[in-house]
Image (tube, rainbow, N blue to C red):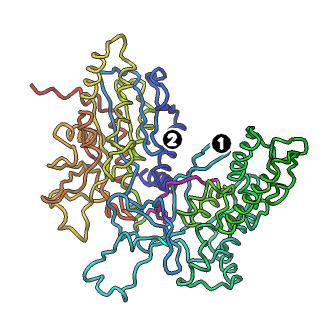
């Protein structure tokens, strides 16, 4: 059972390289299980029914799913499991284009508190969300390039003699920049783009061309470079390849499409002529037809870019008084056209993409457009992360270990949603409270964001559920019932914990050493970095005992903070009893973390039991006098 569940989790990991992909995949799982999607921007309280399940998302990076018990009473409260969708990693900067010593690079910023030295010499790629213009609409596309296209190379030990003695201390602004390609001339880029555009078109609407074909694509690039005899030198690149990256898309489009010689007149020139000619003729020439002639129209000047290059001679005007001035205007505009064309700044259809050409390397833009099978000029902007391309694996001689990035905290994200779905199969009709799974973004950077735990996202939903089932009560009474509901609620803050390291045992408190595959962890912290207290520990321990699930108690050595979770934030914000649980892992915040598959399965069993049994256990606890 544990291996089968772990393999299901591995498939989830493969499809979810970023928070955007995580929420998208969770939505599919919930919809397939009969959950109904609601929208924050729409009134949804009247849609809520007892015995039904729903979910909402925010910013495409956070999600709240809930199942309302068939016997739900607002005063009974909520059983909640919280987790977070984000992990430490690298984000592509808004201006990422960089070239150094013949290499094209992508500037990144660090996100969260990662073990950054583990990112060197790794096969990396990009994933995230891209905004694409389609006619007058803006669509959102998720992207995940499976091929390793990036790498952060290390400095050889021969050049860094003291690294093993004094430690590895890179400058994260200067030494932590991924390389996407060796620098190739603009001519080669043009040919490569043309090849991608003409030879790799998808058949029958499917994107059959794939960046995963490493060898063939490498041969194509090498052949193009060999055909191009231009020798690029760093010191002379300003003169020979000045427009290599910034204007490559405009150059390629201009060379391959003669019609683009007139693109400038279709926008700026069209507007400029219209304003000047309006003054001469005292008319508004806002409607212009490119395919009509001007033979019978003395007051309207139309554009004819698609027929000839900068052709204004076809305009017939019988007014002798204006002809000389129009000729001057035509000459001036033609000169402006030529000047802009020579400077490589012609304002054509690629105008919407100009800023991206200036801020991101053309190879990156080319990779995005190729992966999404879209025209490069349609890319508006994007939010990309640099992620490892190495797949998650089950390892160890007994196949008892799980290796992957982002186990912190996709272990808890996946488990909470699966547990909510599974718990509903048998007991939702008789449930007296409401079950909730919430997955927030930005936990690794403090949660102070729109989609973070300190937002109003969860509280607003809980309040809406409570108010929906309070009838004929004044607002003051509604608020009181909502407060009562929260005091009867329980939060299970699910996050990973530190497993005792066999090579660094001295870093762990001797009496609280948690081992991989020896049970789930109930986290304790005297300074309340986690939220487990007497009553909350009793509740979760009782649930585990009822199902013969092994537990371990964790606590850090004095003087070591050990990190925090969502528990303290949500418990404080909502005034709700809380406990922190999770599974122990090695290498937390490394690019490659390690966990036990038995622990993963036991965490799911615990969460399912929590949803089904919490309310009944709460009734057995007497109030303090």
Q: Residues within 10 Å of mark 2 (few under 14, many from 20)?
A: many
| Element under disc 2 | helix
Asked whether residue 379 is drawn in magenta, I would say yes
The image quadrant where one finds the C terminus is top left
Identify which residue, 356 or 346, lies in the foreground.
346
Write the residue at 37% across / 87% down: 159
Identify which residue, 583 or 194, lies in the foreground.
194
Tell me: 299 left or right of 2.
right
Q: How many marks?
A: 2
For the residues labelled 1 and 2, the Cα–Cα distance comes to 27 Å
Find the residue positioned furthest to the left: 625
The image position of residue 355, as x and y in percent, is 56, 58
- Residue 414 — which label? none
Where residue 306 sits, quadrant-wise, is bottom right
The image position of residue 270, as x and y in percent, is 72, 50
Q: Which residue is mark 1?
A: 136
| Element under disc 1 | loop
> Eyeballing the image, is 474 above or below 530?
above
Closer to viewer: mark 1 or mark 2 = 1
Label 1 with label 2: CB-CB less than 8 Å: no
Query: Is any part of residue 448 visible from this angle?
Result: yes
Identify which residue, 418 or 43, lies in the foreground.
43
Write the residue at 67% across / 78% down: 219
Where residue 120 sits, quadrant-wise, is bottom left
Write the residue at 15% across / 26% down: 623
Tell me: 373 left or right of 310.
left
Q: Which residue is mark 2?
A: 27
The image position of residue 57, as x and y in percent, is 46, 38
Find the residue positioned furthest to the top: 472
Tell me: 233 left or right of 312.
left
The residues colored magenta run: 378-394
> Eyeballing the image, is 312 above or below 36?
below
């Amino acid at each position: 059972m544990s291996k089968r569940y772990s393999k299901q989790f591995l498939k989830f990991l493969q499809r979810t390289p970023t928070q955007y992909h995580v929420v998208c995949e969770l939505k599919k799982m919930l919809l397939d299980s009969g959950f109904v999607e609601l929208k924050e921007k729409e009134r949804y309280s009247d849609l809520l029914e007892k015995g039904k399940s729903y979910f909402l998302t925010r910013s495409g990076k956070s999600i709240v799913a809930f199942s309302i018990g068939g016997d739900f009473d607002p005063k009974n409260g909520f059983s909640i499991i919280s987790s977070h969708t984000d992990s430490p990693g690298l984000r592509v900067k808004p201006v990422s284009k960089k070239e150094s010593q013949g290499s094209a690079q992508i500037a990144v910023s660090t996100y969260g508190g990662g073990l950054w030295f583990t990112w060197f010499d790794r096969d990396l790629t990009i994933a995230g969300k891209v905004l694409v213009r389609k006619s007058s609409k803006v669509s959102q596309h998720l992207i995940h390039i499976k091929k390793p296209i990036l790498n952060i190379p290390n400095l050889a030990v021969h050049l860094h003699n003291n690294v093993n003695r004094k430690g590895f201390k890179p400058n994260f602004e200067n030494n932590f920049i991924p390389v996407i390609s060796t620098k190739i001339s603009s001519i080669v880029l043009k040919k490569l783009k043309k090849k991608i555009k003409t030879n790799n078109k998808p058949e029958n609407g499917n994107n059959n061309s794939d960046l995963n074909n490493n060898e063939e694509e490498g041969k194509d690039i090498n052949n193009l470079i060999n055909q191009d005899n231009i020798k690029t030198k760093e010191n002379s690149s300003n003169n020979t390849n000045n427009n290599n990256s910034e204007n490559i898309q405009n150059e390629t489009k201009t060379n391959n499409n003669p019609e683009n010689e007139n693109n400038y007149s279709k926008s700026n020139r069209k507007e400029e002529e219209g304003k000047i000619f309006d003054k001469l003729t005292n008319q508004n020439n806002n409607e212009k037809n490119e395919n009509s002639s001007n033979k019978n129209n003395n007051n309207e000047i139309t554009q004819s870019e698609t027929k000839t290059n900068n052709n204004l001679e076809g305009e017939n005007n019988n007014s002798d008084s204006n002809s000389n001035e129009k000729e001057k205007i035509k000459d001036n505009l033609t000169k402006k056209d030529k000047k802009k064309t020579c400077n490589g700044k012609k304002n054509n259809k690629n105008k919407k993409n100009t800023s991206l050409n200036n801020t991101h390397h053309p190879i990156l833009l080319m990779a995005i457009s190729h992966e999404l099978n879209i025209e490069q000029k349609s890319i508006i902007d994007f939010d990309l992360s640099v992620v490892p391309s190495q797949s998650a694996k089950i390892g160890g001689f007994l196949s008892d270990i799980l290796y992957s990035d982002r186990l912190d905290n996709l272990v808890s994200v996946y488990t909470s949603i699966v547990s909510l779905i599974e718990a509903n199969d048998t007991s939702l009709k008789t449930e007296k409270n409401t079950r909730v799974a919430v997955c927030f973004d930005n936990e690794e950077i403090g949660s102070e964001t729109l989609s973070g735990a300190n937002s109003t996202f969860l509280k607003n939903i809980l309040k809406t559920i409570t108010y929906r089932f309070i009838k004929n009560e004044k607002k003051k009474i509604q608020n009181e019932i909502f407060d009562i509901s929260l005091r009867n609620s329980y939060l299970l803050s699910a996050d990973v914990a530190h497993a005792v390291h066999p090579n660094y045992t001295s870093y762990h408190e001797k009496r609280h050493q948690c081992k991989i595959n020896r049970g789930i962890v109930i986290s304790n912290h005297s300074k309340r970095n986690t939220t487990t207290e007497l009553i909350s520990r009793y509740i979760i321990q009782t649930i585990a005992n009822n199902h013969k699930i092994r537990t371990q108690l964790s606590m850090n050595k004095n003087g070591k903070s050990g990190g925090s979770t969502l528990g303290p934030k949500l418990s404080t914000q909502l005034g709700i009893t809380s406990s922190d649980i999770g599974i122990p892992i090695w290498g937390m915040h490394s690019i490659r973390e390690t966990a036990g598959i038995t622990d993963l399965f036991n965490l799911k069993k615990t969460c399912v039991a929590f949803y089904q049994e919490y309310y009944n256990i709460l009734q057995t606890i007497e109030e303090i006098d």
